[in-house]
Amino acid sequence: ARGIGQDSPILIGEHLRLIDAKAKSIGSKELTNREVNHNLQLLDRERMENLVQITLREWIEISSPKRNGFVAVEEVPDYIEAALHVALELARCLARSEEFNNDGISLASISAENVQVQVAPKRHAWLPQNIKDYGDGTDDRCRHNIHGVLYLPSTDSTAGCNSSRLFALGVVFLELFSYGTEILSGDVLKSIQKSAASSSMAMMCINIDDSDVPPSGRPRKRSAVDKNDSNYADQMHRLKSLGVHDPICVLLRNLLDCVNGDFCGNEAYKTFADVKLDLEMMIDVPLRFLRNCDAGQSCQIERGDILFGREECIKQLNDAYKRSCSGEFNGVLIRGEAGVGKSKLSTIIEQIARDSNGYFLRGKFDQNHEIKPLSVIGHVFNNICNMIAVDIFSFEDEIKLAKSLESALGSRAWVLAQIVPSLSKLMPLQQLSCVSLQSVDLAESVRYLLSTLLSTITKHFGKPIFIVFDDVQWADAASLQMFTSLLYTKKNVFFAFCCRDGDTSIQAEDPFQVWLQSISVFSLQQIHVTNLDYEGVNNLISHDLCVSPRLTRPLSKIIFNKSLGNPFFVWRLLESLKKNEMIYFSRRESRFAWDIDKISDLEISDDVLSLLIMEMKKLPSDIQMGLKVFS
């Protein structure tokens, strides 16, 4: 085998990254690049000396869950997991070859005989010198000690066309995922491979199922695999009977469909890079991209928690927290239009809080101002007190904290307890007399007491506190003034304020606008959240529909143009399309499919508000009347 850039590329997988990390960590001193490279050479030489290289076919024979012609069902998941990693390493190898080798890859090299698997057995004691003498037994060590996958040069240097190479990979994968079971008969397979190797691809179609028609009644566009019956009509059904997951069956069908060349279906693979991406998603997110589904289980679109297209915002959040630890920042001000996902970023702050062993709290304001002044802030501080009460480990700590709070808050702690009832869990409270209460400026006193409470807690506990206030454009004047007072608490407190930009209902003299101008004296890093780009929309739709990104691109392009990349708009549009059966569950594919023509012709409003109004008009009349009353 030769290196990348030569005749026959080689790719060793995850172990190279492990070797790199190990080389850089040798010893306690910081190594120079030259020393790191030297260590890499030594470690790589040691690794290569301890590896055994066997053909893929031998690896399948040793690792297969088949024993004496029967499949050990309990071993299938373990084998599939290992086989996916083998397939991914081979796809990576071919994708790099595709990128760096202008002459193309030898078609004959992509076969189960030429694909080599490098394994690291324990002293090789378990591996017989003659693989054929090993019998039908299975060894888990062979499955999970994979260190690399490569393919060897072939005497036949015919490169073939791109479709023929993809089809050849499909044949290799078919053998891999069928545990060596003959799914395609040998004579038929040779006939297809001979046709695939020629410059003019023969049209030899594979029919899987013809039972799928969109609910709209309009027949879907047919792919090449549907046009004619053939000897392979039941091959995917046979794979499923062996315990192979639906997405793997679809991957195999779309690779084998490449035998039809220019006449292949819309879902046939075009590059090895796409194959690699699909395999990566099956391994990284198996609950979405490697699951077996039926119409009953998948009737609803599942909204995911992953933030797509927000890498820069997440980087800014992490950077702001690190700088807040050194006193440079008090927190962040997250701004953006309605529906762009400002509130979703709070999940990143929550993750930072967990990683820092800190407290995370969140408060949200209401546009109708139906909540009493300071009640949102009081709710947040009430939760802080509850968390602190649970975290007190000893009676001595409890007494110490109570004395600190009594010293800081004094007799006026009773006033604070009217807003923060759980304060009583941390200290004894003494009710003030009516005369004393009349002499207190309640608003000023509460601002002072809350700030003092927060400072005392952060001094007593070393844990950082993360507080997110959402929709602060709707906050009452008292809460806005409270924010200003709290921002003076710098140690171990990280604030995040989420507010909407471009709201015409908020006037220049509005208390919120005045507050925005006043906080310029504080070190708040501003993060502007915008609409997603096309790739972000495609990743979001792919994840929520549990369909490969390469297949959702046409749908995502239409939805991106209609939604302008607003995440909330995208999500509501997906739900609407599903409700109107333009997105439907396909029994044939065991996944969601869509009527692209109808969606393309659909007229959609230009903003989120219009979309919501359109959806609300579809509600029953009594519910609409109730919404009008409550508004």
Image: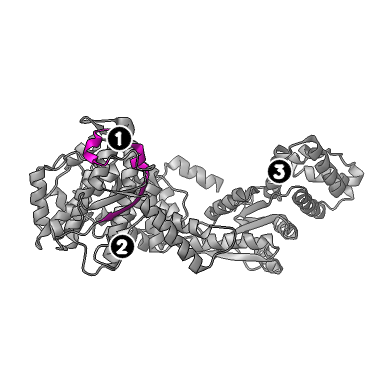
Name which quarter of the figure residue 322 lies in: bottom right
Task: Kindly report the distance in space between the C-alpha atoms of the residues bearing marks 2 and 1.
Answer: 32 Å
Task: Report the amino acid beneath label 3.
Answer: Asn
Q: Position of residue 283 (x, y in %)?
A: 37, 47
Task: Kindly report the distance in space between the C-alpha atoms of the residues bearing marks 1 and 3.
Answer: 59 Å
Q: To which residue does mark 3 refer?
A: 382
Q: Are marks 2 and 1 in contact (CB under 8 Å)?
A: no
- The residue shown at (30%, 35%) is 138
> In this orientation, which residue lies closer to the viewer: 94 or 364?
94
Q: Circle 1: is it few (<14), some (14-19), or many (20+) Cα within 10 Å?
A: some
Task: Report the amino acid beneath label 1.
Answer: Thr
**Earlier residue among tags 2 and 3:** 2
Q: To which residue does mark 2 refer?
A: 96
Q: To which residue does mark 1 refer?
A: 138
Task: Report the amino acid beneath label 2.
Answer: Arg
**Earlier residue among tags 1 and 3:** 1
Q: Circle 3: is it few (<14), some (14-19), or many (20+) Cα within 10 Å?
A: some
Residue 497: assigned label: none
State the extent of the magenta-drawn residues as a range.
129-151
